[in-house]
Structure formats: C-alpha cells, structure tokens
Amino acid sequence: MLRQAAISAVLMCATIAASARTRPHYGGALRIEVHGDAWAPDGLARRLVLDGLTKLNDFGAAEPALALQWSQENHDQRWNFQLRPGVRFQDGTPLTADAVVASLTALCPNGVSDGFQCPWNGVYAAGPTTVIITTAKPYPDLPELLAQTQFAVSRKDPSGVLLGSGPFRVSGFTNGALMLTAYADCWQGRPFLDSVQIFQHRSPRDQWLDLSVGRADIVQVPPELLRQAQQQHMNVLVSRPVDLVALALPAQGVFADAAMRQSAALAVDRAALYNVIFQKQGEVDASLLPQSVSGYSFLFVTDRDLNRARTFRRGAFPTAVLLGTESGGATMHLAGERLALNLHEVGFNVRMASTGEPAAIMLRRVHLEETDPRAALDEMLAAFKLDVTVSGANSRSIWQAEDSALQSNTVVPLLWLPRAWALGERVRDIRLSPDGEPLLADVSMEGAK
Amino acid sequence: MCVLYNPPQLMILKARLLVVAIALASLLPSAQAVSWDQPAAALARQIASLSGPGPVQLVLNNRSALPATEVPQIRQLLEQDLRSFGIVPGSGDSTTLVRVTLSENLRGGLWIAEVKEGTETRVTMLPVKLDASSAAPGAPTLTLRQTTIITESDPVLDAQVFSSTGEQRLLVLEPQRVMVYVRTATPTTPPSPWKEEQVLTIPFLAPLSRDVRGRIAAAQDHLFDAYLPGVLCRGSNNWSAITLTCSGSDDPWPITATQKAFYDSARDYFMGVVVPGFGMQLAPFYEAADIPRVNGSATLLNNVNGSAVLVQSNITIPVNGADNWGSDFAAVHSACGSGTQLIVSGSGSAAAGDSLRAYEISGREALPVSAPLQVPGVVTAIWPASSEDNATVVIHKAASDEYEVWSVAASCN
C-alpha cells in the first residue's frame, strides 16, 4: 500500500507540475466529460462559475477571494468579512454584502442544508461591503470552511440562470453539454480558454472512447481503472487521496446498541476492498482524514478482528438490515456487497437495498476539500453530522477530537481514494486543485492564438 | 483616472538615488544539512512527560519522505536524549513500549510517539520542519552565474536594485504593490540583509490578466516607472520616502533601450506595435532585445506563435535554433564571446524542471553558449536589469509556492 501511495504521489507531483514553460496562449474551446453532476455541491460547474468569500492555498490556509480581509470577535463566534471592491456578477451587477447574505442564507436557511451542517447560525450585511457571520460555537477555521465550493456565492438572473463572479459564465445547454463562456471582466483575469463544454453523466467507457477519438480533451479516470489507464499510456493526472469511502451506521434499529456498531466496525475487511474492488488505489484507512492531511491516520487501527467482532455481538441474531450505497455507481455497489458479506460472517443479516428501498446503513463516498487538518476534520464532522468540537489547532488536539468522534462507530472509515483525469494532447498548463479537481481557468490549448 | 499618493514613511532619502549595477557574486546555493538535534530533544522531553524514567522498548518507524539514511542518526539522537531524562531504551523485557513514527503531512514533518503501558496507550505529537537542499550545476564555455536577491511568498513580476552612497534599495513589483527593501552596502564590507522599508500599494483600477506581467524601470526625471497591464505607476522620492502615483494607462512599455511597445492588457503579450516603429506590421510578441550587428543593431522578438525573428533594416528574418526557447529572454553584456548574450528560459514539458541558457545570435542562427542552468521551479519572468551585465529572473517554486528573484549574468570560463 505504501509503495502504491508513493507511486501515486510521484505520479501526482510529476504530472501536476507538468505545465509547459512557454506562456499560455489565449483562445480555444475545451471539452470535458464527467461521470457525475457538474452542479453538485463540489461540482466542476460551480467551481468555474462561482467564487467563495475565501479560497484555499496549496497548504490549506484561507486566502482572500471575494472577501479581501476578515477579523473575528467574541472568541471566533462573530466574523467580519470585508468584500473586495470592483467585483461584478457575470451580468454586470456589483457584488454587495446583501447579495452575499442572500446567497448564504438561501444555502442554509436555518443553519442546516441538505446533507451537511453549515458552520453559521446567522449571516448579516453591515453596510454595502461588510458581511457579518455568527456561529453557535467557536470556529477559528471559518475562513477555511467558507472556501468550500458548496459555500460559493451565487445569484439567479430573472430567467433562473445561475450567476457568479468566476472565470466562466453559463451560456447555455446544447447537445447534452453545459456551455460555459469566458467572463472577460473576471476579477481574477479572463481565463485563457474561450469556452468550456461540460458533458455530464458520461460512463467511463464513453469518456475514454471520446478521448481516444478527440471528442473530449479531459475525462475522468475512476480509481479502480487507474492502473488500466496507465497501462494504456494515457496521460493521467492523479490527486492525493481526497474521497473517503465510509460505512455510516446510524444509532438506530439493530445498530442502536453501541456494541453492535463496534462489532460491525471490527468485521469490515478493508484490505479486500482495497485489493479487489479498488484495484490497490488510494489508502486503507480507519481515519476521517487521509494520512497526507493529518500525518497521524495510522493511529487508527485498520485490521479486521472477527473474534472480537463476534464477542461484541454477544451471540445476538439481529434482524435483517438493508445496506445502501451513495454515488459511485457499480463499483460502490460491489463494495457494498463485499461489506454485506463481511457482516454476514459475524452473524449480521445484511443485504443490499434495491432501488427505492430505504436503507438502514449506508456506504458513503464523501469528498474532502480542506487540507488544513483542523478545517478538514470540521468538514468531515459536518458531512457525517458528528457533534464534536475540535478544541485546538495542534495535531494532538485534532487527533483527540477525531478519536472521540469515531468512538461511537456511527461512522466507520474504510478507504481514501484519489481523483484522476486523463488528458488529450492539446491540453496544457493544467494542474489539479489540492482536492483533485482540474483548475480549468488556468488551462490553455495547444495551437490556440 | 485614479491616483494614489502614499503617505510619507520614516526612512529619509537624502539624495536622488542613482541606478547602478547589482553586485554579482558567483555563489551558488549550497546544500544545507538538516539538524535533528532540536526535534529529537523536544520529542524525548514529551515522551518523558508521558512515561517517566525507567527502561523502555523503543521502536522507530519512518512513514515520511525522509531518506532511510537519516533514520539511524535520529534514533541515536533520540536514545541519547531519552537517557538524559532517565529513560533507558533497549530493554527487551520492559513492559513499556515507546513507538516513534516519523510521519508527515502537508505542512511538514510530524513525529508521533505512542507510549504503551499495559492496555493504556498515550500519544504525543511534534511538528517538525523539513528543509530541502538545492544545488545547481556549472557549465563549460560560458557560465551562467546566479545570485538570489530575495524570496517572496507573493507573486513577483519584476525587481530592480537602486543604489546610492552606502546603501541599496530593492524594489519588488507585485500585482498589487511595490515592496521596498533597504540594506547598507559599502565597497569594503559585505552587504547587510535586505530589510523591509516600505510597502507601496497599487490601487485596484481594473482586473489584471490571469498571466499577469509587469515591469519596473528607471526613469529620467523621477525614480522609476512600474508598468502593469492597463496601469502605469510613477515612483518618486519626495525627500521623506518613496511615493507611488498610479493611473490607468495604455502607454507603451519599454522593451529595449530605444523602443517601447504597446502591451495587450487583457492578454500576456505585446501587440506588435512599437514606437518608434519599423514601418511594418509585427506579429504579437512576448519579449524583445537589441542585438548588435556589424552595421548597427537588430531587434530580436520572441513571437507568441513560438518563432523568433530579427528585425533589421525593416526586414524580418526568422532565427533558426530557437525552437527550444520558452517565452522569456533578456540580453546581457559580458566580456565573453560577441559581448552580448541572451539569457533564455526553457520550453516544452517541464517534467524535468525549467532551465536558463545563454545564447548568441550569429547571422540568423541562435547558438547555445552555455550549459543549461537548472532552476528549482518555473521561470515566470525575465527582464533586463538596471545594469547591462545581468538580467532579473523570477522563479516560481511550486513546492513551497514561493517566488525567488535571481540576478543572472554570463561569465567567461
């Protein structure tokens, strides 16, 4: 596993730095194909069209984006954000504090959004360029958390088209492709490309075919196909591990008993998932943070222990439990079946939920955007709705908070997976964001003038 | 038009600064060995606070990018330091196990000690700085010599050193500001380190281009001009400090000693319109340099389409041998060869790292006259320096996200 991680890291470093050294050329249209939804909370379209109040640098620290500066009061529970002057939405409307408040409030009307917990409990405008955000508990990493794509600032024009201040604006939806056009007055400068076409919901097979015949410039490579892509000598960019595969065991029904959850956590066979399902990509982990972010993930034991698992089950024969999977398609379904077998071995009666059946336990795939250890843990705690407070910024405090969060076994981390992209010959100056998404605003095309 | 006047600073400039050369040293960065004494002692102290004195079993694992050759040294230091706290490593029959893992995360090293006594495990962690070493090779016929002027965390577009009696000022042009550094410099003593003196803010006038470029150049009737896309800033000395006055401007940028060119403020190149003109339409280009010829001089242009051309007597001549050039170059003068060399950045896929190389133009041929000088990052700008015998080179080091400013000159072997 370490060897694989090392190879991945080397590959990532080599490819991320592989920008041509001549200056980028302006012009050209880029076609990119993705498996998922471009408008998902961490989706590609949101990243290209919208901006956040802050953005993350390569080391995970918050840097100014739509907010130029910020300060905290009341022990990190009240934050003042000063907006950058001169920023306009793509329809020419100036960015104001009211617009930011409306955007964030719409996202989390009562501090809670679908699927995740928002860090704030109040957002107010204090003048045209000042936004005040209050939180129920101290959030010293709030500037980092606000850099997440899901918190990007947007508004809708009268026809319902989403507008932002990012490098591209939505120009239509044609032949199954979301059409984005360069926004010349972007506060970060006009992107080099004239346009980007995003083809969504494309199967890996179709994506690879399109890349091979020149119908696509960038396509996704699922982790389990990474080895195959490399064998085919595809030009592949690989991120560090950024997606957590985890088993969510809500404390209800069969798993209301903590001993049952402990039993299930000891029964999972991470090595089989890693070796067979995900073709030895990523890293086996029992931590909410990947080793590259925390540095301590090996402290969480990943070994399977069937004897202890049976001991915790105490001879009980629980009723049938349905296991569901969240995103990832067929591969996640296979992983779910494998886990159901693991749980069967210690006496749990688990089967995969059919479409439409309500699942009691879920195999989830959760993306991590943050790379600052504390902010990253806060992001994962929010994603799994774990109510634990990180009391300090040092590694030991973060580990203690994570250890406390995982004690209940309502979440059982299994694997961390990288993201990968295969590139056509005309793409240059591309690099990945720290969370593994292509930074298309800096991409240029070979031969463009 | 937006104008900004910077408030006076404390430092007093007694006379108008004269532009002189940066003193070049032939020093290359030397490899720095990392000392583990301090972190080993700190970790031993933390372990002692968890375990107390007595015999322990010590296990050391390396899960970081540290070379395996470093590990025995660290172990030895750690054992020494533990003994100083009364902890005796190496007792195989001890019930206390101390497992030390040399780990790392995105911020650097993280050393973790797990102290296991019976069923209880206590953990302590220590962040450790990991320094990288660097070195650069030499070259055969003519050698490129570099001196690191300064390293910045923000993007640097250009930098120039201005000297007056007994002191030097370094002006570093960034997209949103000009940093002013000062140091003492006398002929008999080595210069002191640069000390930040002023920060001159460039007001927001319009969005800058994504591949933003900028140039800082000495001026005739005031201290300097700073050129940015769509913005011209004028730096003056008003007896108490340097002041900066900026306004939106499409004025042409200086490209050679005698010519200026109009810059496309929405892109990253010169549009092909120069003043005084050549009487012909030029293609868009990135850089220009004067090249001495037998009968006068020619202007060398590095075109956006990747070709290099010489413009002489209103004729455009393609230059051969420039296929491997990057987008940036600057001419320097030396006592070697023809006396004028071009310092050129590399091109193509940068998997092997960027480089600088000296060329001479002979006829219509570009001839390499030095070995490539590898750079620890990507060259983002090359501009002529205020003295003719060196060029200012800006390098972006992706690993640390820092910008190094070099002064580069060609010297004879």
Image (cartoon, coloured by chain):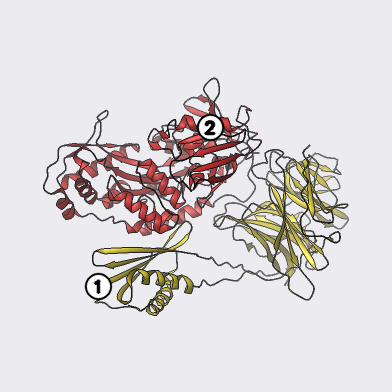
Tell me if I can see residue A96 in this picture: yes
Which chain letter goes with mark 1?
Answer: B
Q: Among the chains, which one is red? A: A
Residue B90 falls in image quadrant: bottom left
Q: Is residue B325 above or below residue A446?
A: below
**Marks 2 and 1 on same chain:** no
Q: Which quadrant is the C terminus of chain B positioned in?
A: bottom right
Q: Which residue is mark 2?
A: A101
Q: Give the colour in which the image draws chain B.
A: yellow
Pointer 2: residues within 10 angstroms few (<14), some, or many (20+)? Answer: many
Question: In terms of secondary structure, where does tag 2 sit?
Answer: helix
Tell me if I can see residue A6 in this picture: no
Which chain letter goes with mark 2?
Answer: A
Residue B22 falls in image quadrant: bottom right
Q: Position of residue B269 (x, y in %)?
A: 71, 43
Q: Amino acid at mark 2?
A: Val
Q: Position of residue B164 (x, y in %)?
A: 82, 64
Q: Position of residue A210 (x, y in %)?
A: 45, 35
Q: Residue at x 37, y 35 (%)?
A: A115
Q: Which quadrant is the N terminus of chain B positioned in?
A: top right
Q: Is residue B391 above or below residue A449?
A: below
Per the model, the C-alpha gap separating discs 2 and 1 is 59 Å
Between B200 and B317, the residue placed more toward the observer is B200
Question: In terms of secondary structure, where does tag 1 sit?
Answer: loop
Q: Residue at x 49, y 37 (%)?
A: A151
Q: Which residue is mark 1?
A: B95
Q: Amino acid at mark 1?
A: Thr
Q: Which residue in the rendered view is the most extreme toward the top?
A: A159
Q: Is residue B329 left or right of residue A441?
A: right
